[in-house]
Structure formats: structure tokens, C-alpha cells
Amino acid sequence: MDGLQTLENILQSLVAGVLIGAMYGLMCVGLTIIFGVMRVINFAQGEFMMLGMYFAYFCFAWFGSWAFFDGVWFPFMLALLAGPALFVLGMALHRSLIHSVTGRQASGLEAQGHYAQLVLTLGIALVLQNGGLFLFGSSPVSVSNELSYSAWEWGPMVGDRVSVFVNQAQTIAAILAVVVVSAFGLLMARTRLGKSLRAAADNPDAATYMGINVDRAHRMAFGFGVGITAIGGGLLATNISFQPYIGTEYVIIMYAGVVLGGLGSIRGAFLGGLTIGILQQVSAIILPNQLQNTVIFVCFLLIILLRPQGFFGRRERIA
Amino acid sequence: MSEPILLQLQDVCAGYGDFDVLHDIFLRVSQGEFVAVVGPNGAGKSTLFKTISGLVTPSGGSMMWEGRNLFAVPAAQRPHLGIAHVPEGRQVFPTLTVLENLEMGAFACRDDSAFTHNLDQVLEWFPVLKDRRAQAAGTLSGGEQQMLAIGRGLMAAPDILMLDEPSMGLAPAIADEIFERLVAIHRKRSLSILLVEQRVAEALHFADRAYVLEAGRIILSGAPAELQHNDRIRQAYLGM
Amino acid sequence: MNLATLSGLKRDSLHIGVFALVYAVLAFLVSNSYYQLIMTIVPVWAVMGVSWNLLSGYSGLISFGHAAFFGLGAYLVALCLVVWELNPWLTIVLATLAGGAAGLLVGLPTFRLRGHYFALAMLAYPLALLYVFEWLGYQEVALPMHREAPVLFMQFENGRWHILLGLALLVAALLTSSAVAHSRFGMALLAIKLDEDAAEAAGINTLKWKLAAITVSAAIAGAAGGFYAVVLLVVTPLAVFGMLVSAQALIFAMFGGVGTLWGPVLGAFVLVPLSELLYARYAADFPGIQGVVYGIAIIVVILFAPQGLLLKLQAWRKPGQVRLLGSTAATADFGAGDELLVVPPIPDENPHDNPVLAVTALSKAFGGLQATNDLSFSVRHGELLGIIGPNGAGKTTLFNLLNGFIPPDAGQIRFHGQPLGRQRPNRRCALGMARTFQVPRPFTHLSVLDNVVLGAYVHADSRQQAVRYASAAVQLVGLHDLHDYPAANLTTKELRLMELARALASRPTLILVDEILAGLDAVAMQDMLAVLRKVRALGITVLIIEHSMQAMVQLVDRFIVLDHGAMLAEGIPDVIVRDPAVIEAYLGKKWLQGTEKRAAAGAARTKGEPGHE
């Protein structure tokens, strides 16, 4: 009896882990693009996720009651729209603030450009987090509709007992996440824009010799990174409740996924995020709620201490 | 020589931070010429190219390209004017395939419709690249990477091809092969070439005209025949 | 402790004393309990700033996780009071020790990481602790009141006592910070900040000093946290482990001036009252205003005055002047002679038989490229050996292998007969192997003499002795006129000479000289050669890399020519320069053929002329 119950719990967690992990994977991809192309550690990535969530929330709140928009697909569409919206914000932020501490200018700064990037994005994170607190209030909200509460039953399986409930909203969100990652992967692999971003990441000097404007490439990469993570956030918003401080919690989760997969690798980041999602959900079986995230932090620390180049992606270039 | 002057440097000084590496450089490349710049290591040859390409900002002098002031043009724009730079150490994009590297070379090409034609030409000149089309550039051998880098430069259908020490780190036989291809391309296309080389004799053998750079200054210039066995060069390199 | 440290410390103590006096007087003048609270909180945050500065400001290792130590201190004091009724006088001391221990524990694994990985790890620690404490059920720990013994439990009726305690803590922190800054500890941290590799090669044990820094820094942060708990009387995970805490530690130091003594104090004294007042007036309408203010402050500072206010003001008053760091109160001692630099030989070892350095079958590959290919050679005592080869021949890789920056794939290196194994560069320097770098690595904000002194510490017992060695070295290379100039103002040649002096100050038996002649004009080159001859005359073995034969032929006893990482030729200059393989490698095959043709033609002509034999 107990065994079957445990089996069911494990299967349930695995399924939930895969679905949520897909959304984490998407967010990790956004983060890794920024690092891969610009070599920037963006501490504010969690805040951009949060902004994506609130974008979906507010659009839903304002327009959701309109007849045309009251379908179950609306929240998901909003999640997708968060992408372009945050893309524009990301580009604007890069042009106004970030570009002065990254790229070629960084070499002129004292104490290596690294430091300045980290601190700047920390400052941006604080402003967004607390600005969000002011603008959005501190009570948790979410973007849910009836899909969030319905699930397909898969089973009963073994001995008429074991059933796995697959949440419908999660499933749709996960599918969309995979679609977005694939589309972006195609963009990077097949289009001239994507190739020029990869070239700028591989060798900025040589890219300049080709006539590629590396600064502009960085700006696009930042925009993409922020936008993609925002879509992930918007999708996640259909599943969980959130408040303006949620970014801090998730930034370590995202970095854990990214380093697991190898900094700079898109495929690695997605798989890394997926793994983290599974780890998180499965650990819920044995650990109390608050410690789930601690497990992830510990994983993160172990990875960067023991195998910083990660497991899934290509080896990070030795600079 | 009634050929139009493509590139002209006059009294150019440039360096890194407060230290000038180049002093009072004068240099001229006319259309269809093969010009070599030779000199021992540390003479400033790479700095010269970086200055022309815009990665190093000069502190004085003037640089003209087809009559316009090059100083005013940002680095990423210069390839679009027809200046192709094949950097020292090849500097291919290691995670991109050979084909993608060549596509990046075409980024600055002024005539998009010529892409297929240019690609076919490059693959014809360097058949080994055709075989390795889909391979990641980082996995190629040194000689193959050099050919890729040159091919990449040619994809932009440039007016001038600048090559920074293409023979560096390559076995002499392969370096010779590359030089021979270069000359063939130069003759066939009347492409202007500016070559920087440590190996003097090779460079002088193929060039129309040469400059000798030492400690950041041009100490000699002229036709190869005059320079070929000049003891001053030998002195600069070997010390006796 | 020595004279220079004491004088710097004395000066700072005076300033600290005056500051404390003024603040104490102010404390007694203020009677509003809210302002008294602010006057207590401000020094606490100043202490956090000082703590952060001691690690990150002095060493350049940016920590985003000081909240971990702060929070541990706070919870220790709170829980000890709640559970065991231990008084804060005792437990704050415990918090200091616990903080230090935590710092050491964190530093040991984390310092193996470089750059962004280090920053990310530091960010994770306090967040992990936050979750743990929430899980443990300590969402809100209130310190119980003990009215029966207010002094014992630091729960004074009169808020002024808290202010004084906070002030005392700040004074202690500042004195510690000053003592560190003016000592060898501080100099080592500065060297690490300016160029960790160069510091390592100069014999500074970077790991040891980094661990010392984080231990002291974390201890101070723990004390701050402990006192904070006493003042606020309630501890929640977010308030003590949250990102805002780490950010505050950082912003105060950055705002006021990274790496300076008073910077964090300035930052705290400006920003804390500002944010507290904003919070008090606007928090109801604008929740989160504190965070926004700090965030904007961080952004503005990092973009416009990354050095902080103090240094921006100084730069504004004296534009163009390079700021000189460290204690330049070093008294140069130029009387001593060059012999100071010579290490007396070990009596047992017979210097004329055994090679100083013996390399056997050394190999190293990077990816597909074989940078060093089965290389074997040895260097005799007192020899001046030149390693030469065209670009890309693997010369600098060889030095990095000899010096210990990279491990070989195969082969062995024996120094004075002992195999070197995996010993780190600073260890090799202590054994007598010094090195200069191809691109000079000056500690730009130090004077020439201080740059060299850093290299002297490895074998000096005291600062005075280090200064003597350094002075001798500076004199040998001819820089004694420039000894108190900031290194940033030197020309290429002078920088190279300074590098050489720094290497000499460690009293090596072998110096690895990496392309010291590159790019020098004829006159400078002759000067440099003269110095190198002087070094050799002292009996120090010199291994010099150069690409250009031109100068080397006048200098070296023997050459080794490398090509593609392998040995191409070996011998005395006269022979090497005429070696066909060498000529081909340098000038090309065609030159060689041309030379041979001319030689043949010349021989034919000579034969034909009468009277020549």
C-alpha cells in the first residue's frame, strides 16, 4: 500500500517537475544568452521575470473581462506578449545604463569591468524589486483561470491505484516553453542575426573585422535574454502566486540551472532548468516546503565548486 | 603608376594607453598592388593593422581610404567600405561551422546577390573548405583555419585584403601553399593586398612593393629587388 | 608591528579619537528617542561597510554575501538570550568569533573560484541561510525584556548608551581596518587586488591572505549583527539575511570610497539617515522606498564615481594625479650594496656541477595545439641563457610551466635538484625562482619602491629588511631617482626595470626574464642590456626569452632556439646565427637559398682572383 502511494507521489512529482522544469528551462535560456554573448552576470534577471509576471497579470486584469479576451488561452498569450514588451525594456536599459560598463568600455574601468557589471545589475535589481513593491503592492497575486485547476488523469495504472494528475495549465505552459526555446534556437542557428550574435560571442574582435557592430549585438542579446525570461515568468504566473520579491528567490534557481548546463549553452540551460525543476518537485516528497529551495542552492554551490563548466552544454571558452 | 590610391597613411602615430607603438608611419597602397610590410617581432605590425581597422585609435597623423578620412569611420563600419582584415592568429569563430564563418565574412559585402558566386569562388580556391563545410571551425588544423580566415575575408568582395602574418605557426610547406593561392587570387582578381609578414623573403618574393618596420618606424621602403638582400634588414632580424 | 605601521596607525587613531569624541558629544545632545535610534543604527551599518571594505575593498574580491555573517551574528545573540539567557556582552563576542569561523569556512572552498563564480557563490550563502532559518521556525525571534538587569542585558532605559556602544564597535572596527591597511597584510591584499598573478609570482601567498581577510571581515560583520539584534530587539530572516543587507554593506563602502578607511563611514553617515528619514515619511505611501533609494545610489555611483565620493573629491581637487595607495612612508635605504641581493650558496651543494634548472621531456598542449613539445634542457649556475624563437613558438608557455602557473602534461622540472611537482608560483618564488612578465604588471597605484618592496617580503623577516632589499634592487636597476613615483607614470623601459627590480628583491637564484627588450629603441635597449649584465655579474642565473636576436647576440652565453614548442637548435650565438635551420625559421627558406647562392657565387669569384688564399 505504502509502496504504491510512494510510487504515485514520485510519478506525480516527476511529471510536475518536468512541466515546471520546462518553464524554468526557458528562464534559464534567457539568462544564458546574456552571459554567453556578453559575459555579463545579470543579478536582475529575477526581477525581469517578475516584471513578465506582472505584465501578464495586469493585462489580464484590465482586458480579461472583455468578451474577446475571455478565453482560456488569454493568459498564455499574455505570457508570450511579455516577451516583446520586456525585449524593448531590455534594449533600452542596455543602451542607457548597461553598455557603459560592458564590452569594450569595460576595459577602461578600474578593478575590471566584471565588478562594475555585477554591481550595476544589483542596483537595477534593487530598484525594480522595490519599485515593484511600490507599484504592485505586496499581496501575492496570480494569473489563473479554470485550466489551472483542472487536470487530466493519467491512469489508473498499477493495480487500479496509481494515478497521476497532469495539470492542464502547466502542460500548456510547458508546451509553449518548448516552442519558444525551439524557435529561439532556430533563430540563433539559422538566421543572419543569430549567427552574428554567436560570432560576437565567439570573438568580438574578429566580429568587428567582419563589420558586425558588437555593441549592437550585445544590446540585442540583452533584449532577447530579458524577453525570454519574461515569457518564462509569464507562463509560470499561471501556476504560482507571486509578489514583487519573488525575483530573488528565482535568480539562484535560474543560475543553478544555467551553471548545471554550462554557462553560455542554450541547450544546456534548458536541460539544466528542467533538471532543477525535477529536483525541486521530487525533493518535496521528502523535504518540508521551505527547504526545497535550499536544496537547489546547495546543488548550485556544489556545481560551481566541483564542476563549474556544467554537464550538458559545450565547454565554456577559456578566455 | 596611374592607378588610384586606395589607402594612404601619413605621419600616423598610435599605441595603447600612453605608450605610442607606431611613430610617423607613412604607407600607400594603390589599386591592384601587392604591398608587404616586414619587420621583426615587436616592430608594431599588428598594431598597424589594428589602427587601420579601428581597434586602436591613433594619436596623430592622417589615414585616407579612397579619398575619405578613415578616422571618422567607426571600426564596425570600415569593413563595409571594402577593407577586409584577416587577423593575426586566424581568429576564426570556433563554434560556428566553416560555412557559417564564411557567411559572417559576407556580412559586410556590398552586393548581397553575389553571395553564392563569391562562396563558390572561395570554395574553389580552397577546396579543403568545401570538404569541411559543416565542421566547427575550431576543429580545423592551423593551415585550414588560415585558409578559412582568408576565405572569410574574400567573401566580402573587398577592395583591399589585409593579412596579418598568415604564415605564423604553420609548417613552411603549408605556408608556401597559402602564399601561392594568395598570389593567384591577387592576379586573377586584381585584388589589392596588404601583407604583414615576419618571413621576409617570402613576402618580398611576392610583393610589388614593401616597407620595413622596426621599432614602430618605417626604416626602408621600395621594390623588392632593392630590398631583397639589403643587409639592413638582416641586421634588424638577426643582429649581425 | 613595526615603525611604519605604528605611525600610520597612530595617525588614524588620532582621527578616530576625534571623530568618536564629536559623535559622543552629539549623542548626549540628542534627546529624541527616534533620532537616538538612528544615531545607533548608523554606526552599525558603518561597521558593516568597514567589514565589507576590509575584504572586498582592500582585496578586490567582491562579496555579495556579507549578510550571511551579519545574520549569523544576529541570530546567535538572539537565540542565546532566548534559550540560555546569556547576556549580550558575552554573546556579541561569541558572534564575532562565530562570524570569523563562518568566514573561514566560506572562504576555503569559495576562494578557489574566480570572478563571477565567486560573486554568485557569495550571493547564494545568505539566501540559503535565510531559508534554513525560516524552516527552523525562527521567522521572528523577539528578544525578551530583562528589566531587572538592564546593564547586563544591554537593555538601557537611556538610548544614549546604545549609541555609545555602537560607537565603540565602530571605533574597534576602524582601528582593525587601519592596522590591517598599514601592515604587510594590507600591502599583500592591495597587491592581490591590483594583480593577483603578479602577486603570486612575487612570492605572496595569495590564498593565505585572502582567508585572513575574509575571517577578519566576517568577524566584524558578526559583531555588527549581534549588536543589531540587541538594538532592534527582534530578528527576522529577511531583515538580517536579505539581499538588502549585503547590498547595504556594499553601497556604503562604494559610495564613500572603496578601499579607504573613512569611505564606508561617510557612506553610512550619508545614506542611512537619508533612507531612514525617507522611510519614516513616505513608507506608508511608498513601500520599498529604501530599496529604491539604495538601488539608485548604487547605479549612480557605479556609473559616475565608481571610486566613491572621497576619491572623486580628491581627483577633482588634484586632477590628473594618480592616487597613491599603501603606506608610502617606506624609508628607502640606498646605502646598502648590491651584495644584499645575493643569496649565499648552500655549502653542501656544489654549484659548478649541478644545473640550477633541469627540464626533462616537458610537454603541454592546449586543445589541439602542442605548445611545448618534449622539451629538455638544463641551465648552469651563473649562466645567461637565451630562449629564442619566432612568434608562436611557445616561449611564454614555457615560462608559465616553469613558474607554476600551468601544470605540464608530461615531463619534469627540477630546481636545484628538487622536482617542482605542483608547487604554486609563490612557493617557487620562495625557493628562489623569480620572474618578470611580458606585459609589465605594475601595481599601478603604488610607488616604484613599494612595488619592489612587495617582492622583497618573501625572504625578508621584517618590513625594514624588505625595504633594504628593495632599495638595493631599485638602485641596481638605476631607478633610485624615481623610487617614490607612482608606477602608473613610468615609461615602458622604466616599467620593465621596475619589474626586474621586483624580481631581484626576492633574492632569487634564477630569474625568468620574459621579453624585456621588446619594442625598445636602440638606446633603451643598450641600457637594459647593461642592467642585465650587472645582474649576471652578481652570480644570479638568468633565463631570458626574446624573439629578436638582434640584442640577444650581444648578451647571452648560450642560446636555445624553439620552434613550434620543440628545440630547434642549441649553442653559442656565433654558431646559432649561422645555423641553416634557424635562418629558415626566422627569415624564410628563400632567404636561406639566396644566402647559399650568394655564398657559392662569392666562393667562385674568390677562387678566380689571384693572390687570395
Image: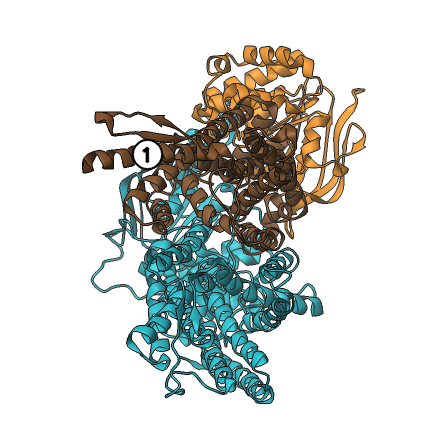
Chain colours: A brown, B orange, C cyan
Q: Is residue C340 visible?
A: no
Q: How many numbered marks are there?
A: 1
Q: Position of residue A96 (x, y in %)?
A: 68, 47
Residue at the spot 50% in from the left edge and 37% down from the top edge? A238
Task: Name the chain letter of the residue that bears numbered label 1.
Answer: A
**Whole-percent x and y of residue C365?**
36, 35
Dot 1, crowdedness within 10 Å: few (<14), some or many (≥20)?
A: many
Q: Is residue B53 left or right of residue A167?
A: right
**Above or below, A127 relative to A152:** below
**Which secondary structure lies at badge 1?**
helix
Q: Amino acid at mark 1?
A: Gln
- Residue at image position (59%, 46%) is A102
Q: Where the N terminus of chain C falls, by quadrant?
A: bottom left
Residue C402 position within the rendered picture, expressed as x and y whole percent measured from the top left: 35, 48
Q: Nearer the viewer, residue C111 or A237?
A: A237
Q: Is residue C341 left or right of residue C7?
A: left
Q: B213 or C261, which is in the foreground?
A: C261
Residue B1 visible in the picture:
yes
Q: Position of residue C397 (x, y in %)?
A: 40, 42
Q: Is residue A111 above or below residue B167?
A: below
Going 56% across and 76% down the picture, which residue do you hit?
C38
Look at mark 1 in the image and give the residue it sits on. Answer: A12
